[in-house]
Amino acid sequence: QVQLVESGGGLVQAGGSLRLSCAASGITFRLSTMGWYRQAPGKQRELVASIYSGGGTNLADSVKDRFTISRDNAKTTVYLQMNSLKPEDTAVYYCNAKDPFTPYDYWGQGTQVTVSA
């Protein structure tokens, strides 16, 4: 059974930092592409950052200078370090896994990030 369990969300003032974690199980983590998406009220879900099995990363232009994605294969966990947060970063953040051995996308339950002005 695949599980992606996010943690680390919360309420923070503009300019502050948060670190999101996503603990994965039931997938071939070290070979999976892991990602963080977010969805704000009334908007479509969008890709924030992804990290490939080899460690390469891809970040959305809106967060490129502020967010960092990393992974710990030994802990089967992916992280999203978010610095210099802005009110427009407010959203539910979802962890995503793409396991190369299955045709499915896997999603966590989401964690709320709220940035106050």
Image (cartoon, rainbow, N blue to C red):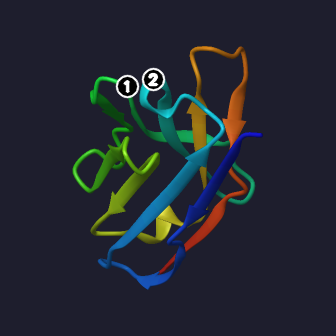
When the figure is inspected, residue 72 is found, relative to residue 6, above or below; the finding is: above
Q: Where is residue 92 in the image (x, y as percent from the top left)?
A: 64, 61
| Residue sitting at the far left | 65
Would residue 39 appear left or right of 48 to someone viewing this image?
Answer: right
Name the residue beneath numbered marker 1: 53
> Tag 1: Cα neighbours inside 10 Å, few (<14), some, or many (≥20)?
some
Q: Name the residue rendered at 32%, 79% in the picture.
A: 16
Q: Can residue 117 be seen in this view?
A: no
Please state which amino acid type lies under the numbered disc 2: Leu
When the figure is inspected, residue 44 is found, relative to residue 67, above or below; the finding is: above
Among numbered discs 1 and 2, the one appearing first in the sequence = 2
Q: How many labels does the image show?
A: 2
In this orientation, which residue lies closer to the viewer: 29 or 107?
29
In this orientation, which residue lies closer to the viewer: 27 or 22?
27
Q: Is residue 94 visible?
A: yes
Q: Where is residue 79 in the image (x, y as percent from the top left)?
A: 40, 54
Would residue 91 appear left or right of 19 to someone viewing this image?
Answer: right
SS of the residue under disc 2: helix
Name the residue beneath numbered marker 2: 31
SS of the residue under disc 1: loop
